[in-house]
Amino acid sequence: MRAPDWLTQRPVAHRGLHNAARGIIENMPAAAQAAVAGNFAIECDIQLTADGEAMVHHDDALGRLTEGSGALLTKTAAELKAVTFKNTPEQMMTLGDLCALVAGRVPLIVEVKSHFDGDRKLVRRMVQVLSSYSGPVVGMSFDPDQVLALREIMPALPRGITAQRTYDDDGSWAKLTEAQRDSMLHLRHGFRTEPHFVAFWVNQLPAPAPWIARNVFGCPLLAWTVRTTEQRERAARHADQMIFEGFVPGT
């Protein structure tokens, strides 16, 4: 199966078309509505709840953008749906809520956030939601195990790998073992996960692995996250489309 043509036809709004200065925060309903209004595809993140729901949120804990505190994994969907984004009246969505809001009007690119513990509950819930959704949608993850889960549980759903050239043992990658980080390097899991596209960090393009995936295996290449003119030019040279934030393409 090839990646769908629509995947690269339009720029992709990173976590929706958000603009904090206008009170539109990433991954909240207004960011999705703004992307639909601009006819941009929407990249979003999903996190698992204590009761197995898929919530649209990047961080695995409350507090950076929302009221409240604590790990999403320790809270139920009902508790999280009552959480508001700071300085806005808007509340957190489930993946099902997002699908109902978008209603197939623009493509969805759903990133499965992972604790790198082999748990497949989030992918299973994602598959349940998407099985009744007729709009254009793909799934992706940094975690090869989650991409493999997508391949095994919903093989008809186009899937991708989110990647970068290095995974240092600090910052967000500190919790991973050396073996886990090594398994993510150079897309070496590709023959196991069989991704249909690659989303790669724009600052590390060009790189051998995404070049091979794109030019040898025919996998479309998305560049994330494009914020500056230099990054936009780099994405245009080395990728098929950009995942952007902080500006509106074409304006």
Image (spheres, helix red, strand yellow):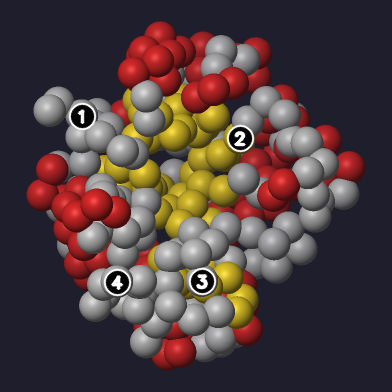
User: Dot 3, crowdedness within 10 Å: few (<14), some or many (≥20)?
Assistant: some
Q: Earlier in the sequence, mark 2 or mark 4?
A: 4
Residues under numbered marks 4 and 3 in contact, where contact means CB atoms less than 8 Å apart: no
User: x, y (%) of residue 63?
Assistant: 51, 71
Amino acid found under the numbered disc labelled 1? Pro
Amino acid found under the numbered disc labelled 4? Asn
Residues under numbered marks 1 and 2 in contact, where contact means CB atoms less than 8 Å apart: no
Does residue 115 lie above or below 143 as drawn?
A: below
Disc 1 and disc 2: Cα gap in Å? 24 Å
User: Dot 1, crowdedness within 10 Å: few (<14), some or many (≥20)?
Assistant: some
Mark number for residue 87?
A: 4
Q: Residue, x 52% and y 88% (percent of image)?
A: 76
Disc 1 and disc 3: Cα gap in Å? 30 Å
Which of pointers 1 and 3 indicates the residue nearer the eye?
3
Amino acid found under the numbered disc labelled 3? Gly
Please indicate, yes or no, whether residue 137 appears anywhere in the rendered image. Answer: no
Q: Which residue is mark 1?
A: 249
- SS assignment at label 1: loop
User: x, y (%) of residue 91?
Assistant: 31, 77
User: x, y (%) of residue 223?
Assistant: 45, 27
- SS assignment at label 4: loop
Q: Earlier in the sequence, mark 1 or mark 3?
A: 3
Q: Which residue is mark 2?
A: 163
User: Dot 4, crowdedness within 10 Å: few (<14), some or many (≥20)?
Assistant: few
214 lies left or right of 146: left
Disc 3 and disc 2: Cα gap in Å? 26 Å
Q: Which residue is mark 3?
A: 63
Q: Earlier in the sequence, mark 4 or mark 1?
A: 4
